[in-house]
Amino acid sequence: MDSRLNSFLQRAEEVLERLDPLLPVRRLALDWDVTVAARWFREGQGGYLQPLQVSLDLSLADLVGIDVQREQLARNTRQFVSGLPANHVLLWGARGTGKSSLVRALLAEYAKGGLRLIEIERDCLADLPRVVEQLAGLPQRFVLFCDDLSFEAGEGDYRVLKSVLDGSLERAPDNVLLYATSNRRHLVPEKESDNDNWQRVEGELHPSEAVEDKIALSDRFGLWLSFYPFTQEHFLAVVRHWIEVLAAQAGLQWQWNHELEILAIRWALGRGNRNGRCAYQFARSWVGQQLLGSE
């Protein structure tokens, strides 16, 4: 009897060892008193929040030339952190113009006031109700951040997003907002065929239901912030700012001049783009070269 029991226990242990890698890892609840940012990862039929080690060295003052957008977003976030009514936000426009950087800078500005940031990938939007459920009732204020949000024709995930933002029977809790960035104002591609069913009846236009359905998604965001391509003057102002910041950190003595301005313009022309990302990259390259040459 004992030998049969030992044999059974041994076989059971072998089976458990083989099954163990297939079982989901037990996840502990995050301590939001010390965690300021996390990312949602999908796992099996569910998912979990993974804490992120983030740098809080980007300030709102570093975002040069987008003063109007910066102030509107900061005001909305101050309302939210203070427990006042605030809106979901869509930041849309040209790439590299500071949309994502603004959100990161807000975390640095308001983390001590209770603001927390959760990144959620566009492919995980169907998990939004699960994420929101975990945050309800917590004292912190959570911004769900979806970077580069857009949907292709035929995709239905945007309807899940519409329900979470507004329109479902179970509304998102007051301590959760969604901030999204996109290159598209309406998030979903609009085609000429969408207008095939437009009709004019006694002077009144009746847009097709397809167009209305697409526009309804971006309408769920109460605040729209538009970002436009940089002018050359704006680009050079951002270059100068970042050189000042990086040079001060490295103790580098430098002076703005016409030659440096020409180098920055050539850098942008070589990439076919003038934006904040390009300006930051040039500043890093130029300061690095100066430091290397001084060794």
Image: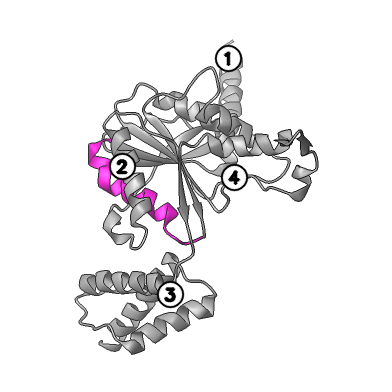
Q: Is residue 106 visible?
A: yes
Say whether marks 2 and 4 touch (CB < 8 Å): no
Q: Which residue is mark 1?
A: 5
Above or below: residue 251 compared with residue 150: below
Q: Which residue is mark 3?
A: 232
Say whether marks 1 and 3 touch (CB < 8 Å): no
For disc 1, the neighbor class at 10 Å (few under 14, some 14 to 19, many from 20) is: few
- Residue 182 position, x and y percent, is 53, 50
Of labels 2 and 4, earlier in sequence is 2
In three-dimensional space, the C-alpha distance between marks 1 and 4, rounded to whole angstroms, equals 66 Å
- Residue 96 position, x and y percent, is 47, 62
Looking at the rendered structure, the secondary structure element under dot 1 is helix
- Residue 276 position, x and y percent, is 41, 65
Q: In the rendered structure, which amino acid carries the disc numbered 2?
A: Arg
**Front residue (pair 84, 106):** 84
In three-dimensional space, the C-alpha distance between marks 1 and 2, rounded to whole angstroms, equals 69 Å
Q: In the rendered structure, which amino acid carries the disc numbered 4?
A: His
User: Which corner quadrant of the image does residue 196 belong to?
Assistant: top right
Residue sitting at x 36%, y 28%: 175
Looking at the rendered structure, the secondary structure element under dot 2 is helix
**Front residue (pair 84, 143):** 84
**Front residue (pair 71, 77):** 71
The mark closer to the camera, 1 or 2, is 2
The mark closer to the camera, 1 or 3, is 3
